[in-house]
Amino acid sequence: MVAKARRTLHRGRTLLRKSAVDYFRGDGSDWLPLVGLLLTVPALAWATTALPDWCPPTALVFPVLLGGLLLRPASLLLLYAAAASALVVEDAVLGPYHSGASRTVTPGTVLVVSAVAFAGLMIAQFRSRVGVPWRRGGTMLFDLRERIRVQSQLPQLPDGWHAEMALRPAGGQSFSGDFVVATRTGGGQVLEAVLTDVSGKGMDAGSRALLLSGAFGGLLGSLPPHQFLAAANGYLLRQDWDEGFATSVHLVLDLESGDYELLSAGHLPGMQLCAGTGRWEEKAADGMMLGVFEGAEFDGVKGTLNSGDVLMLFTDGLVEASGRDLAEGIDRLIGEAERLVAHGFRGAAWRLIEAVAKDVNDDRALLIICRD
C-alpha cells in the first residue's frame, strides 16, 4: 500500500510538473491558472463583504488583470462572468451605493473593473492573433537580442592583432538597426567583417537587422569578397520592404601581410591611423546603397595596416547630428581617438561612443581593428 501510494504521488507530481512546464512554454492548456483565478474571485468577494475596510470592491481588478495576461480569450470570458457575478453579490450584500454605506459597489467600481477587463481582453486577443503567449514573448525577445549579439561577435584573431566592436541602440533600447557580422576565411588567414546600417533605428529597424544579419552571416565567407555586396543587394531587393535600403561596408583583411580592401555600399568612409606619420587617412570606397536598384557596382579601396596602425569603421549615428556637418562629426571622433593613441585602443570602442555620441537618439556602432 505504501509503495502504491508513493507511485501515485510520483505520477501526480510528474503530471503537475509537466503541465506547468508546458504551460509556461506556451504549449499546454490554461486550465490551471483559470481554476486558480476562479477560486480567487469568490475569496475576494467574501473578503469585500466581511472586511470592507480592508478589501474594497475594486479588488476584483487583480484577478481580471492577471487573467488578461495568463488566459486565452475564451477562458477569459468565463473569468469575467465570475467577476460580474461577484459584483452583483457584493452589491446585494453591501447595499446600494446611495444608501450611505461607507463601502459599497458604486458605478465607479463597475467602470474601473470593466475598463480593466476590456484592456485585458484586448491583450489576450492580441496574443492569440500573434500566436506568442505573454510568458514566451519576453523570452523570445531576449533570445532575438542574444542572437544579434552573438552574430556580432568578432572571431579570435592571431597574436599581433586586436579587434573590438561597440554598439549602442537609439533611446537605450535593446534592438538596433546597426550590426556587424565577421568571420575568418582562407584557412583563417583572412578576416572578413561587414558593418551595416539598416534604414530606421531602434526597434523599428531591429527586426530587419536581425533578418539581414542572419542572411549576411550566411553569405559572408561563402562567396568571393567582390561578390558579397552584390549578393546582399539582390537579397535586399527581393524583400520588397517599404524601407528596404541599407548602407554597408565590407572589410577584407589579410592577417599575415596586413593588406586590406574596403568595399562600400553607400557607407561612410573608414579612418586609418598611420603610426609612421601619426596622421589619420580617409579610406573612402564608391558604391550605391543596398536595396536601391539591381546591377549596382561596388568599387573598393585598398590599404595596408602596418605595426601600430588602427582602422576605424563606424555608422552615421556616431558622427551625424542636426545642425552639424558630417565632416565636423568625423573630426570630433578623430580628435577623441587621438587621446587614446598613447595608451592603446583596447577598450576604446565603447569609450569613443560615450565621448562623441552618448546622448544621440540614433543607433551607433564602431568597429576598431588594430595591429600591435
Image (spheres, rainbow, N blue to C red):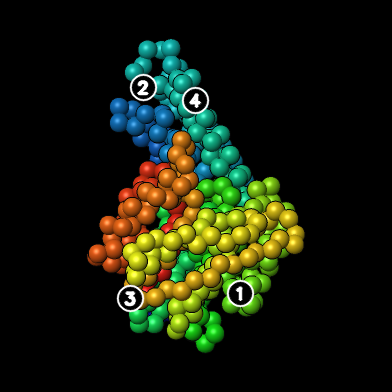
Residue 4 image position (x, y, % from top left): 43, 79
- Give the residue type at disc 1: Pro
Nearer the viewer's eye, disc 1 or disc 3? Answer: 3
Which of the numbered marks, if any, corresponds to residue 225? 1
Where residue 103 is drawn, which disc sits there? 2
* Left/right of residue 126 with respect to residue 6 in the rendered view: right
Q: Earlier in the sequence, mark 4 or mark 3?
A: 4
Query: Of tags 1 and 2, which is closer to the observer?
Result: 1
Q: Which residue occupies 56% across, 51% down?
A: 205
Q: CA distance from mark 3 to mark 2?
A: 76 Å
- Quadrant housing residue 131: bottom right
Location of mark 4 (residue) = 110
SS at mark 3 in the image: loop
Q: Quick one: label 3, few (<14), some, or many (20+) residues within 10 Å? A: some
> Measured from the top left, where is residue 92 in percent x and y?
47, 24
Mark 3 = which residue?
Answer: 372
Labels 3 and 2 touching (C-beta < 8 A): no
| Disc 2 versus disc 4: nearer the observer | 4
Quadrant occupied by the C terminus: bottom left
